[in-house]
Image: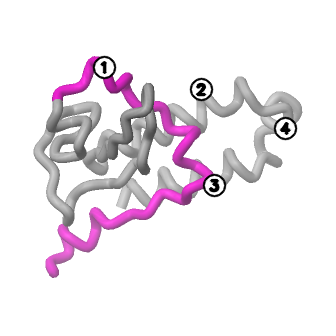
Amino acid sequence: MTTAETRALVDIPADLLPLIPVPHLEILSDARARGAECVWGGEPLSTATAIDLGERETHGAHWFPRACRRCARAAVLAARDRHHPGQCEQCADDGSLCETRRALHTLALELRR
């Protein structure tokens, strides 16, 4: 396995997956919904380059979005900076003490490599 292949393998902790918003299933192509392409950018993905965004369920349909490293990092940063703080009492008081925010930050750093 090459460095580029091993670099892409990042496991997003299960407790963080729901915090990372993905596009609505209804607007996605089949390839994006089944994880063959990045759910945001549409880049073709392989098992060596895809970041798994977990199984999702929409109206009883199970789907498996995946992302490229760049788009996954952008989504994690959005979750850290915009989505999570608006739903977290600890972030409203002092975001530096929030374990979830720190976990999202650590994940963003890992996706940067």
Name the residue at 17% across, 27% down.
29
Q: Residue furthest right?
A: 93
**Labels 4 and 1: the sequence-earlier one:** 1
- Density class for disc 1 (Cα within 10 Å; few <14, some 14-19, many ≥20) is few
**Labels 1 and 3: the sequence-earlier one:** 1
Of badges 4 and 1, nearer the viewer stands: 1
- Density class for disc 2 (Cα within 10 Å; few <14, some 14-19, many ≥20) is few
Marks 2 and 3 sit apart, C-alpha to C-alpha, by 15 Å
Name the quadrant of the C terminus: bottom left
Figure disc tally: 4
Of badges 2 and 1, nearer the viewer stands: 1
Q: Is residue 95 left or right of residue 44?
A: right
Q: Is residue 20 magenta?
A: yes
Marks 2 and 1 sit apart, C-alpha to C-alpha, by 24 Å
Tell me the amino acid under the disc marked 3: Ala
- Density class for disc 3 (Cα within 10 Å; few <14, some 14-19, many ≥20) is some
**Residues drawn in magenta:** 1-29
